[in-house]
Structure formats: structure tokens, C-alpha cells
Image (tube, grey):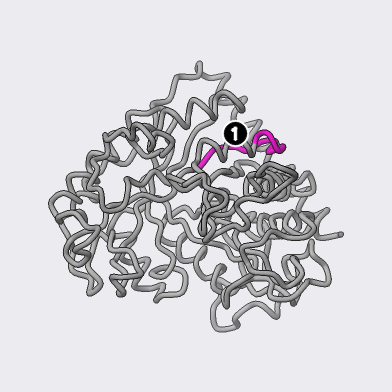
Amino acid sequence: MSKRIVLLAVAAMVTAGLAVSAATASSKKPATKQSSHLLVGINDEAFTLYGNPTTAFATLKAMNTQVLRVNLYWGGTKWAVAKSRPTDPNDPGDPAFDWTIYDRLVRYATQNNIKVVFSILFTPGWANGGKARTVPPTNFKDLENFAYVAAERYSGLWTPPAWQQDPSNPTTKLPLPKVSMWTAWNEPNNPIWLTPQYKRVGKTWRVESAFNYAKICNAIYDGVHSPYLGPLPGEQVACGVTGPKGNDAPASARPSVDPLTFLTQAHRFGMKNFDVYAHHAYPDIGAAESPTFVPKGNQARRVQLGNIGALLKLVSKYYGPKHLWITEYGYQTNPPDKEFGVSYAKQAQYLTQSYAIARKNPRIDMLLWFLVRDEANVKTGWQSGLATVTGKHKPAWNAFLAVPRG
């Protein structure tokens, strides 16, 4: 408890300092309206989180990357932070936690002037009765506690205990850099990431993914914004993080939920609040649709860049004019993907158009391209890299460099 009190006091002083600075600035001259700003970045976990960080961050810096998004695994993988239940779930230094690769990533990112978005994802078996990692926790307080300790560890005010420091690396004795951007889960309307998607309740099907996601969003939001953390200034939690489509077929072999229905149902089931909404505005795989394409007919509930206004309208209806992060986007190329790829030239053209569309929308604050390099397995992986699997630059590489940074 003493560490929490100290952190609370320091955070309060930081907040007070920001308030004084703002007051001083406002007394000198009237506030001016800021032009819209679009953060340009990358979503690539394999290359940056558990790849070679020296190579990865040198590459990201050369690409003038402003933001990097990776998953922060609560459980479910060998990179999970909490493979066993912590003795003190409110202590980031509890021995049950292993933050090693995440500490490394935020230090490298900060050294290269890159902001990090952490997506809290997957349930450890100890928190859901040993079920699959896609099944939410039995007690959502466990998830809230994890969001709390993650925000505390990466508050910019927290120094790892001595046993977590590397004597040969002086930087490990310094407070860890601040991470202030978070997402709650990843594509919860897709059964790859959250299950079940539907549940039979009486004679009707309940959108179970939205029912549980409302609690996931609330838990992560409440953890990051905990009053025991100050609350910390500048923290932003994005909810939604939805995939672009869903079949809305609860009795099918692989049911999923379209993003508009998902948002409506999550609101219905009590998703209280968030700082910003997030969405993956991909075009339909293999359809070679341009960024301006608007789905129609029985596909009208797909949400991609061409009809992103439909999602923003629904967000406004339930939560007011919140802003949007596009935390995944991309076009696969042929070569190497002969089935779903567009030409190299088209990928570059569509990248330029996509960023221009996003920049013109005053409510879109971020667009992250997926990936830096193609994945090796063409059948199961993604080939939307700005470079080939061997590192050869596609034309989209230079197109990405040419995108204006605000």
C-alpha cells in the first residue's frame, strides 16, 4: 500500500504541475484551435516484441514511425505476464509477473521517440477455470487488477525492484517509460479472440461476446483510470477494437458479429465509457476494394474505411463525439499471395489514399499499418508488409515514408 500512496502523491504533483502550466499558458494568450493530427504508425508484434529489438527499432525509426501497437498478454501465451496468480495483484513487482520483454520494448521505443499502444489480451487459465485463453475471466476484478498494475508499471513513475534490474544495464535502474495508450482486447467480435460469440438464452440468441466485452472494457478502463493512480494524466483507453465484419449467424460453425451490432449490444449490456473507440477498417480480403469502397446490400454492416462514418455515427449516438483509432489496416500483395493480394503498385496507391482519407476526418486520430514485413507462411500468414519477408522494400515503403506526419 505504501508504494501506491507514493505513486498517488507523485501523480498528483504531476497533474498539478500540468494544471499550473496550462493556466500560465492560457493567461498569456487565448487558446487557438488545433488542426487535426493523425498519428502514423505500425502494428507489428513479431518484428518488434519478440524479434531483434535493435534491428526492429532501427527500422521503425528509419520509417519515421510515430506509434507502435503490440499485444500485452495477460495470459494464454509463452509471453504472458501473469502465468500464475499473483500474491499481491496490485503490485507490479509481484514475483508472479514477468514483464521482461515488455520492459525491453518500452525502453527501446522511448529511446527512438516512438509511442506505444498496449492491447491487453487473453485470459490466464487461473482466472477462468482453466478454459481457453479466449474465454473471459470468471471474476472481472482480476482483469481490472491487471490493467491497474500495467498502468502503474508504465506510469513513468515506477522503478523495477532490484531483483528485476540488470547490473550491466544502468537504464534498468531508472523508472520505466510511460505508456499512456491502451486498448481493451482485440477484435472481440471475432471468435479467434473472444468466445463464445453467442449464447442461447431462453428462446433467443444473446450476443455473448458483446455481453462479456462490456465487462472487459469497463474492467480495463477502470484499472487504467484507477483513482489510486492519481488518476494518471494523459491515459487513454480505447474500447471496441472491432474487426471489420461478422456473419451474424449464431447457429453457424463459426459465428461472428458485425461491428455495428456488436457496438449496439455492448452498449445495451452496460459498456460504460472509454476515451476513444478503436476499429480495424480493413477492406474485404481478396476483393481488391479501394479505400473509398462502400459496402452495400447484405454487406452494408461491414465497416471499412469507405463507410467509417457509419461507425462514428453509432459511437456518437451512444457515447457522444468520441474519436477513433484505426489500430490495424493494410492491403496484402501479389506476389506472394496470388489469391488475396493486390499488385505492389496498388498497395502503395491504396496506402496513400487511406492515410489521406483518415487525415481529412477530424475524428480519426491514428492509423496503424499492419505489417513491416510479410509473414513467411503465405497460406496462414499476412502479406501486407511494406517489405517482403526477406526485407526488400515494396513501393508501399516509400509511400509510407511520404505520408505527412502532423
Question: Residue 134: image x %, image y %?
Answer: 61, 63
Q: Is residue 232 visible?
A: no
Q: Is residue 6 visible?
A: yes
The residue lying furthest to the bottom in this view is 168
The question of residue 271 being in magenta is answered with: yes
Where the N terminus falls, by quadrant? bottom right
Q: Residue at the location (68% across, 45% down)?
A: 211
Span colored in magenta: 267-278
User: Splitting the image into 4 quarters, where does residue 168 fall?
Assistant: bottom right
Question: Residue 308: image x %, image y %?
Answer: 40, 33
- 374 vs 176, nearest the viewer: 374
> In the figure, 303 relative to 85: above or below?
above
Amino acid type, mark 1: Thr
The residue lying furthest to the top in this view is 30
Q: Residue at the location (41% across, 51% down)?
A: 328
On screen, residue 41 versus residue 155, left or right, reads left
The residue lying furthest to the right in this view is 1
Question: Residue 58: image x %, image y %?
Answer: 33, 66
Local SS, label 1: helix
> In the figure, 242 relative to 172: above or below?
above
Where the C terminus falls, by quadrant? top left
* Disc 1: which residue: 264
On screen, residue 243 versus residue 287, left or right, reads right
